[in-house]
Amino acid sequence: KNEVEQSPQNLTAQEGEFITINCSYSVGISALHWLQQHPGGGIVSLFMLSSGKKKHGRLIATINIQEKHSSLHITASHPRDSAVYICAVRGGGGSQGNLIFGKGTKLSVKP
Amino acid sequence: EAGVTQSPTHLIKTRGQQATLRCSPISGHTSVYWYQQALGLGLQFLLWYDEGEERNRGNFPPRFSGRQFPNYSSELNVNALELEDSALYLCASSLLWGGTGYTFGSGTRLTVV
């Protein structure tokens, strides 16, 4: 079993829809990251969370430490949101410098 | 402020050759991380350097190595290239421990033929 699991693996939505991507993890973490990867490979860091909720524009990220679960929400989705969204966790102890990644959720928003 | 820069953007090598990939972190960041994203697979942690030292290493063979220079830039070297080394190699930088988040480069796409 992967240490970081994302669902769904693929997601197709119509423009304007509310989107939720889920991430569950099984290891102790010091922080959780949501990343966005566009075709071509470049990665943008969207959020870093260690508790609660963060909002940036139409993006909202939440984390429940007790349940080891995080969600990324996109409100009023737009075709430019089409990308792969990756959940990554930063461990504790000697591994706290590096990230463990989920396999990503490929989002396609249709006009 | 310049972001994390990686070079080259694309690299084509023959099996058995060596590849050298370079990364310049954001000014002020002391940690550099290398990740491999093979086709159809998720990102895998390769190496973490901070203050010139290797801090942690992923589950990769010793022919994957690197170093960090006094100016905090870093090189990733892959020796005895194999076809399955073909992948996107991403570099990220952060302050120590990644406590304030990571900034990623655009990657080097290595193709081994």
Image (cartoon, rainbow, N blue to C red):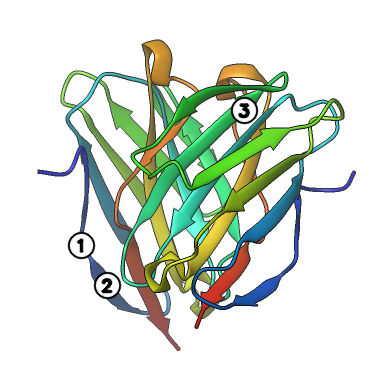
- Residue for point 46% across, 71% down: B86
Of tags 1 and 3, the one toward the viewer is 3
Q: Are marks 2 and 1 in contact (CB under 8 Å)?
A: yes
Direction from residue A1 to residue A98 in the image, left or right:
right
Looking at the image, the residue that sits furthest to the right is B1
Amino acid type of the residue that numbered disc 3 sits on in the rendered structure:
Tyr
Residue at screen point 25% across, 44% down: A23
Alpha-carbon distance for marks 2 and 3? 36 Å
The reply to whether residue A17 is in sight is no
Toward the viewer: A97 or B57? B57
Closer to us: mark 2 or mark 3? 3
In the displayed orientation, state which residue is furthest to the top.
A93
Q: Residue at x 41, y 74 (%)?
A: B83
Which dot marks residue B49? 3
- Tell me: B1 left or right of A14: right
Element type where label 1 sits in the image: loop
